[in-house]
Amino acid sequence: MDSSNDEALDIIITNVVATFRTRCHLNLRTIALEGTNVIYKPEVGKVLMKLRKPMITASIWSSGKIICTGATSEDEAKLGARRLARCLQKLGFKVRFSAFKVVNVLAVCSMPFAVNLINFTKNNRPIASYEPELHPAATYRIKNLKATIQVFSTGSLTVTGPNVQNVATAVEQVYPLLFECQKPLAKT
């Protein structure tokens, strides 16, 4: 970060996606009839179950694979997944919580300046792309971190990555590149 600008950037995690396995077969019809806060989708072969605390939506398949979305931290995702496993145990299934993994983290961040997307894309050509006819943001992919950053002209960023550390590192890496391409302040 630039020494003249000691402003800290707030990276707000908006969604954490995690998966786990129950190590047993799940009867979706039983979950739909006896469970609470469930939506049965037989045409897709899954049940959606919602928890209120933490606010999580889970997609449950009969194979025992479960995907949890909606958490705002990795710890919250794990707590929600364990709570979900406990709910299924109470419905009579022999659930054993295993193979928990955070697979995706979505975060947003705002730069304290606007960005000239055309200059940003020209300066970072192989890894940055900007198609204004298709999407209003420039896409910047960092392969070694497996992170993707959507950069908007207002200075807003949307970052996706495999975990919270990679998301934070991606923002740190892209900040100096964005700082070079900031738009001059409008004169009043």
Image: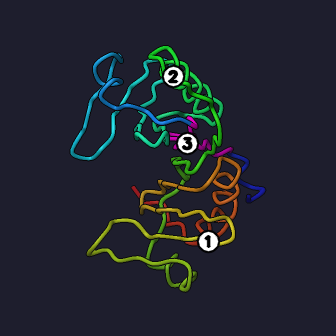
Dot placed on the residue nearer the N-terminal end, 3 or 2: 3
First-in-chain label (2 vs 1):
2
Q: Amino acid at mark 3?
A: Ala
Q: Is residue 19 magenta?
A: yes
Q: Which residue is mark 3?
A: 18
Q: Residue furthest left?
A: 43
Find numbered disc 2 in the image and state the secondary structure of the residue it sits on: loop
Q: At numbered mark 1, what does the secondary structure look like: helix, strand or loop?
A: helix
Q: How many marks?
A: 3
Classify 10 Å Cα crowding around label 1: few (below 14), some (14-19), many (20 and above). few
**Nearest-to-viewer mark from 3 and 2:** 3
| The label number, if any, that marks residue 54 in the structure image | 2
Q: Residue at x 56, y 30 (%)?
A: 81
Q: Quadrant of residue 96?
A: top right
Asked if residue 37 is among those painted magenta in the image, a careful observer would answer no
Relative height, residue 15 to residue 113 (above, below): above
The residue where tag 1 is placed is 180
Q: Residue at x 74, y 58 (%)?
A: 1
